[in-house]
Image (cartoon, grey):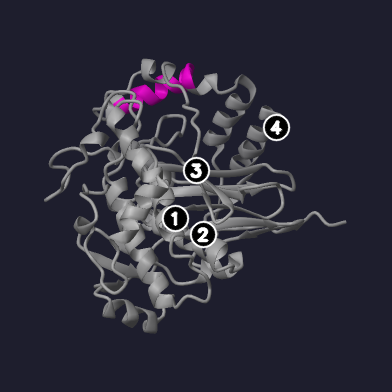
Amino acid sequence: MQWKDVVTMAADVARNGFNVTHDLAEALAKVKDQNMSVAFRDLFLPNGQAPLAGLLTRRLDLAAILDAVAVKGISEFYSGNLTQEMAAAVHARGGVLTEDDFANYSTVLQQPAEITYHGHHVMAAPAPHAGVALITALNILEGYNITSQVPRNSTYHWIAEAVKIALGLASGLGDPMYDTSVSEVVAKMLSKSQASLLRQMINDSQAFPVSHYTSSFTLEKGAAAAQVMVMGPDDHIVSVMSSLNKPFGSRIVTTSGILLNSQILDFSWSNKTKNSSPNPHNSIQPGKRPMSFLMPTVVRPAVGLCGTYVAVGSSNGEKALSGITQVLMNVLSSRKNMSDSLAYGRLHPQLQPNTLLVDTEFLDEDVELLQAKGHKVERTEVLSLVEGTRRTNDLIIGVKDPRSADASALTMSNMP
């Protein structure tokens, strides 16, 4: 499809109207009493109240922006009137964004972080994103030869410790284009021999804090994210994650209706939070990209074209790492279908404080087995939302996380 046609379709949705989702209504209700720009309040909270789920709403301002971008291309966003508006809106709130920042911006094309895991080619977002941490976790877990026949208490314990190590290493990531020492960290995180050494440090019957395995820094709070996975009958797979950081980003809205992000909060700095240990590789610098747990992931056969194809993504900051790791283990190692793999209970090893979080789907008997290995377990309602697609032969199955009220998925068959 042509660029103009694709963008015009999005403009039509804004123009013709869409229903407020449960997630959007709930998120707006949570922020309605917090600090925000007048433009944001007028746009999203008319009369000071959050809209009800299901309400039809239109964004004619956004439709006009998309119409202009459809006709004039992306330059309209980076060197036109919209650029002036965005820079002015930030300046009005005390920020330092300039039109030159937009003009000098360029996307960075990189090779993915990748490995072969039990005959599967796994590709994830490279540094400064935490896809390399996913590779670390999988490399460690590969040595256990986990299958559906392995006792769950051992599998869960190994996953918890492997992800804990991966999180600790990820806490020291930054933009390798601005810090060459990050490349050395990444090389170790991708190394199977290094993973073998880390695996030997894991005790099969005893949990340890992250300091037993590696030094670590304070992890920044998780970002809210949107995710899209697309898979066709050919060898093309798309897995995309996008985020404004905090829900509704900076809550600054331009006169044309553009909501600005708050990605700067993904950087680390001193005194950001109490008792924090900021990551020096993730300090703020002009042009630098912050460390991020946006980690779209794709899997295909390591050899040939026949086999399993998977695309997954997850939201909620650092918990995306544990969510994606467990879903991939379910699919690739335990040979579970995608629906079951997304529905199973999940765990997440929190580094500070040293606590193993489990969601409401996690079985009580499994909690007891983990506690017996020294894990301090706490329950929470939802850890992460993981969405996925899987292709086997001619069947492509899209599966939404059952924990999400608003996600959607489509299944298609290429069979005649």
Q: Amino acid at mark 2?
A: Leu
Q: Which residues are magenta?
A: 78-90
Q: Amino acid at mark 3?
A: Glu
User: Between residues 104 and 349, which one lies in front from this camera angle?
Assistant: 349
Q: Which mark is residue 334?
A: none
For the N terminus, give its image quadrant.
top right
If you read the primary sequence from the N terminus, does the residue marked by circle 4 or circle 3 appear first?
A: 4
Q: What's the CA distance linking mark 2 and mark 1? A: 9 Å
Q: What's the CA distance linking mark 3 and mark 1? A: 11 Å
Q: Residues within 10 Å of mark 1 (few under 14, many from 20)?
A: many
Disc 4 vs disc 3: which is toward the camera? 3
If you read the primary sequence from the N terminus, does the residue marked by circle 2 or circle 3 appear first?
A: 3
The reply to whether the C-beta atoms of the residues labelled 2 and 1 are less than 8 Å apart is yes
Question: Looking at the picture, how far across and down is residue 284, in whole percent?
Answer: 25, 30
Residue at screen point 52% across, 34% down: 61
Q: Amino acid at mark 1?
A: Leu
Residue that label 1 marks:
138
Q: Is residue 40 left or right of residue 333?
A: left
Q: Secondary structure at mark 2?
A: helix
Quadrant location of residue 205?
A: bottom left
Residue found at the far right of this picture: 416
User: Between residues 279 and 88, which one lies in front from this camera angle?
Assistant: 279
Q: Secondary structure at mark 3?
A: strand
Disc 4 vs disc 1: which is toward the camera? 1
If you read the primary sequence from the N terminus, does the residue marked by circle 2 or circle 1 appear first?
A: 1
Q: Which mark is residue 114?
A: 3
